Image (cartoon, coloured by chain):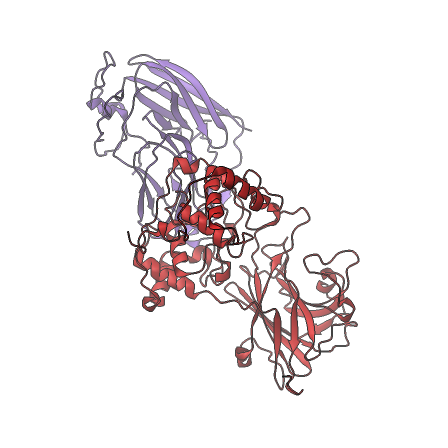
Amino acid sequence: MHQTKFVSPCAIAIIVAIGCGGAKPQDAAAKPTTTEAPMQLADAPAGTAPAATGTAAVQVTVKFAGNAPAAKTIKMDADPICQQQHATAVQSEDVVVNGNGTLKNVFVYVKEGVKGSYPAPATPVTLEQTGCWYKPHIFGIQTNQPLDIVNDDATLHNINAKPTINVPFNIAQPVKGMKSSKKFAKPEVMVKFKCNVHPWMNAYAGVLGHPFFGVSDDQGAAAISGLPAGTYTLEAWHEVYGAKTQTVTVGDGEKKTVEFTFKAQ
Amino acid sequence: MTWAVRVGVAFAGTAQQPTPDLKAGKAAYEQSCARCHGVEGHGDGGDAKRFYPRPRDFSMGVYKFRSTTSGTPPSDADLFRAITQGLPGSNMPDWQHLDEQTRWQLVYYLKSLSPVFEQTKPEPLTMADDPGLAHADLAKGKAVYTQLGCAACHGAQGRANGMSAAGLVDDWGKKIRPANLTKGWNYRGGSQPRDIMLRLMAGIDGAGMPSYAEAVSGPDAWQLAYYVASLQEPAHWNLIAHAASITGSLPETLDDPRWASVERTDVRLRNVVQPDGEWVEPPTVVSVAVQAVYNGEAVAWRLSWDDPSQDQHGSPDALALVLKPEAAQGDTVTLQAWPYAGAPALDVCYWSAEDNAARETVTTDYATAAAREAAQASLTAAARYEDGQWQLIVQRPARPTNPERAASMTPDEFVSMAFAVWEGGNPGARAVSPWIDLVLSDAHEPAHH
């Protein structure tokens, strides 16, 4: 089951935002999601601006210019349990250029312009270790949203998280099926995860205080919806090619297209 | 709160903690610590490049030996303990000669060097009670060792030769080795079961060893700690190695029962420092165990050292047993420096895993010893590699005439002996020992009282 990397803000519309002037509740049909439990939100703390949702959306396309670097083949012979799960050799995931010339696994998020506080969803984000590989490789999560880390392999993994703003951790999961639940209290872009036992494994998480983020897929597309009208700075982050920003202004009900282009080095 | 449960206050020194005086702490730091840890605590002191493990960079706020949960800073008591007891097997000495007040001021000063101590509070571990040695179940502990996947890094017998051991990197991307569990004297945080338990629960931050707090129950973790402690092989750091007297032919096999009663001496090995002072890779061979017997004509040594990989080609595993010949007696030559221009010739008995043969030559460099030339004397040798350990027998006449100027060994006289070991998986390195004295005893001679 493909896990979405963020909870659709459309579900937030059940609690009507105050002060958004004219916002209409959206129905959940706007965003294709898998069936998941309805999100439960804590009440916003008294005195802070409540979570604002809107009806604007940004459709991001991340393009790649130039020749894709040759993918590196990963050697998993240090652990036969890893190796035997792959019929063919696994390629590195740090640069994945899609067939249509777009770039996958770019973390796209609203860096500036978000107002108000967005309580953490109770629904967890899941990070799997499958075939000695992290799935997903790049993902977003909200502050204080649970991160469930699951070991799907019959071998020892350790999850070594190295944030610089949040509290780091390094925990062992020796048993298949083990699940550990962690949270990040502060926004941080990006938090790196690695496994010491299998040094080729790594993943990155963007921790944000709001739900306006996405990861470019195998069409190079990422969608951010439920934005209140306003002017925002969008950032696109890639683990090799760095980060780029753009400003976008959206009005109520507006859907804008934004393009980022990363160049081969 | 009971001692057994609240680990965080278990080691708190005898005096009450004084109030912080950062000026005093800084002065003490500059006097005692800056030389290795750097003037501003970045682990960049003048000597730092030559040390493995490297002196801690305090500005990172990452500490390895704690009684606190993974990712949280050490408690004051943890820092006090590291300063007071030092870290065995590393270049961090104990600082017991500094009075307690000074050591506490150093603790406060260290904390001031990183914002981590303000951002995150140390979270003391909650540990299960120690069941005590009487209730240690080593079979259970061994089962837990298997279940938790420890062998992936530490190896099936704890000799740091697991499948993932060679590829480990620390949090700064530098190569690091897992602990060789058979060498309790080399555990940085202490070798007692309680110390091991702390490492399991807290993990070793920065070094890659994760916390098992969520993966194993308290009682099972204690059984594992007792099992790991049972893997330790006590070291005998004798400065004089005695070759036991035997009659008849020398033992030619590693499992000859006569070895069982021969005294064993462990000799410390340290990597030769590179010309530019940097380590090539972390040392992997840290000691060699030596036994020797003498039958009136010849000497046989039984040697054993841990080596995480068996390398026979390219850069093969090798060992040199070096004796000081007559002409070099009184010379201050050391294997840390040798060979060098103008160095005295040394008597080198050189064994290589490439052809499993040992040859003796008196030479001014190792290369001559490693070359297979007719001028070298051939020695009897037998070797075996098993699960992270080499074992080797070398036989040599006590008073050979070939090669010329060979070292002569006479009963009741000291012969200077040293070792150099090459580990093929770490080809830039050579691990060498200081000189120790070898003495042959001879049952045919009248005993000296």
> Residue at the location (47% across, 50% down)?
B100
Name the side, left or right, on which B274 lies relative to B68.
right
Residue A110 is at least partly visible in this image: yes
> Residue at the location (72% across, 58% down)?
B338
Q: Is residue B192 above or below residue B383?
A: above
Q: Is residue B278 above or below residue A14?
A: below
Residue B139: give x, y in percent of width and height. Answer: 35, 67
- Which chain is tinted purple? A
Name the side, left or right, on which A57 lies relative to B17.
left
Residue B421: give x, y in percent of width and height. Answer: 62, 62
> Residue at the location (66% across, 50% down)?
B274
Q: Is residue B119 above or below residue B329?
A: above
Residue A21: give x, y in percent of width and height. Answer: 24, 11
Closer to us: B20 or A189: B20
> Residue at the location (47% across, 37% down)?
B112
Q: Is residue B309 above or below residue B395?
A: above
- Which chain is tinted red? B
Q: Quadrant of the C terminus of chain A?
A: top right
Name the side, left or right, on which A54 lies relative to B391.
left
